[in-house]
Image (tube, rainbow, N blue to C red):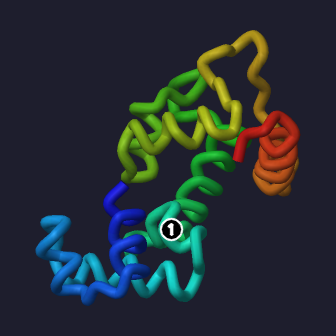
Amino acid sequence: MQRARIVLAAASGKRNDEIARELGCTRRTAGTWRKRFSEQRLEGIVKDAPRSGRGPHVRQHVEAEIIRKTTQETPPQATHWSTRTMAEALGVSRSTVHRVWRDNGLQPHRVKTFKISHDPHFAEKLVDVVKISGRDSGQS
């Protein structure tokens, strides 16, 4: 709502400092949204711009290793991986393992239906299939 008010105030000829005073924001905020609207129109103010942070490359690498170990190895002295044992083996959090398994439809605790694959390219194929099926069902 504030973004739209900033754009409307700018359209009426107000300066950033006037807009900031009127709407209770900073000049920088007023200037940011004004500039984004002028460059990108409505798309520029509808959602936030991407922010810095850990890039997807790190997650992709960890995800690939979790998928590989889950589908091609069993833990020592156990029949299947748990989020705890996988997290400990790879030095990641249990929630990371859980998210990767959930996102890729992996359920190694279901021993009756879960099978280890010996295909060295299984992880790549799984990611491709999950992405394709996610697109078909309206997920992203």
Hey, what amino acid is under mark 1? Val
| Residue 121 higher or lower than 95, as above or below | below
Element type at marker 1? helix
The percent position of residue 89, horizontal first and vertical second, equals 44, 46
Question: Residue 129: image x %, image y %?
Answer: 86, 45
Q: Which residue is drawn at 39% across and 37% down?
A: 94
Q: Which residue is drawn at 78% across and 38% down?
A: 138
Q: Is residue 7 above or below residue 103?
A: below
Please state if 62 lies on the left or on the right of 5 as rendered: right
Identify which residue, 75 or 100, lies in the foreground. 100
Q: Count of labels shown?
A: 1
Q: Image check: 48 left or right of 79?
A: left
Nearest the eye: 101 or 56 = 56
Q: How crowded is mark 1: few (under 14 residues within 10 Å), some or many (20 or more)?
A: few
Say which residue label 1 marks: 58
- What residue is drawn where x is 43% and y is 87%? 35
> How far across and how far down the image is residue 10, in percent?
37, 81
- Residue at left 60%, top 36%? 101
> Outermost residue, front direction?
12
127 left or right, relative to 10: right
Quadrant (top left/top right/bottom left/bottom right) for the N terminus:
bottom left
| Nearer to us in this view, 6 or 92 | 6
